[in-house]
Amino acid sequence: MASFFEFFSQHWQLAIDGVSTQAVVPVVQALDIAQAAGDPREIAEAVLIAAIQLLLIAGVMRPLESLLPAERWQDRRLTTVDRNFTLLMLLGLFPLFSFLVLMPFAQLLGAGPATSEASGLKALVPWFEDHPYVLFAVYYLVYDCAYYWIHRAQHVLPWWWAMHSMHHSQRQMSCWTNDRSNYLDGMLQSIILACVALAMGVEPAEFALLTLLSELVQNFSHANVALRLGWLGKVGERLLIGPRFHRNHHMLRDAQRPERHNCNFGQVLPWWDQLFGTALYHDETMRPTGVGDPVVDADNGMGVIAMQWYTLQRFWGAVRCRAGWRLGDVSFSGPGYAPIHDQDLEAQASSSFASHPTPPPLGSSPDAGQKTAH
Ligand SMILES: [Zn+2]
Ligand SMILES: [Zn+2]
């Protein structure tokens, strides 16, 4: 009996052929870019992944947000820019990026169409040849674990946080928020993940499935949905990341518990957070999402292009100075967007506190205590 993966692969290839001949080839010919566009099947694959994602976001997650909102909003105005990011990413940049950067990169590293010769994990452990489900589970574990560590690096390396903070600056987290990210950040992350997959010997159809599963869970974990599943939900959230778990990752920094927001870095499996001591479940009041650093929060007034440009300026400001390479939570300052470590800020605040006879109480300004929620 054909395994699920063969079944998936066959039907996936059929769907790719259909989209390629019916949609991609006519468009490529009409635009007269056949030379530059490369293999139309690669574009078709990215288009298919994007279409499935969009269908599930708009058709399932968005209605759920209206039915069971975690946060009630007067209007959804701030989610508009995130929706635009998602449409731009899924309908344009993701297919483009896939065949302009990822595919040539994969070919460069020697991955191509599946061959009869085993590579990666299959070459290391021939037993996997006969156990494709176990092998896929192992691929997934390694892929997701790598994602967890990339995400921790995005928070702890100031130059990376300068870009990743754009994902966190939203004040209305919704099913569209997953694709709100800086494109340089996304590219870097995708290339690292592709390298991990290539090293394991993941084949192209399997990589498509890995990416799709991961993205769908991430789209859902950003949705403004309160699933009231009782004990089932509690058990479920120990197995798979849901909206409440990821919402804690996006919480505003709490002045009383300044390390509280450094939690829940996992993408699909919460096990890495449990294993490495960063898991935070919801036995407490839900906090609003966003960042307190006014320089990062200024993202909110911007459109898609301006936000990308502004984030790149922050990134450049962090790369250029030594503090941008020292690990730890930072805020950005001045016209050059130099990062200032929160520890240094706190030290400065306490020394000026000591030198003033009647210092203003900490927490007196509306933003105090909300600084740099990451
Ligand atoms: Zn994050
Ligand atoms: Zn997120």
Image: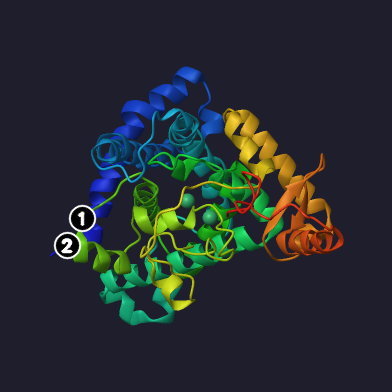
- Relative to 124, 367 lies left or right: right
Mark before the other along the chain sequence, 1 or 2: 2
Residue at screen point 38% across, 59% down: 245
**Mark 2 = which residue?**
2
Residue 167, given in percent of the width and then of the height, sits at 54, 46
Q: Compared with residue 151, is residue 78 higher up or lower down, i.e. above or below?
A: above
Furthest residue in direction right, as rendered:
355
In this rendered view, identify the residue nearer to me: 119 or 322: 322
The answer to which image quadrant residue 344 occupies is bottom right
* Residue lying at the far front of the rendered structure: 358
Residue drawn at (77%, 59%) of the image: 349
Q: Residue furthest left?
A: 1
- Given residues 22 and 252, the one toward you in this image is 252
Tag 1 and tag 2, C-beta contact below 8 Å:
yes
* Secondary structure under the numbered disc 2 in the rendered image: loop
Q: Is residue 71 above or below residue 301?
A: below
Residue pointed to by mark 1: 7
Mark 1, other Cα within 10 Å: few <14 / some 14–19 / many ≥20 = few
At numbered mark 1, what does the secondary structure look like: helix, strand or loop? helix
Q: Which amino acid, by three-letter code, is at mark 1?
A: Phe
Q: Residues within 10 Å of mark 2 (few under 14, many from 20)?
A: few
Query: Which part of the image, by quadrant, shows the N terminus?
Result: bottom left
Q: Is residue 310 visible?
A: yes
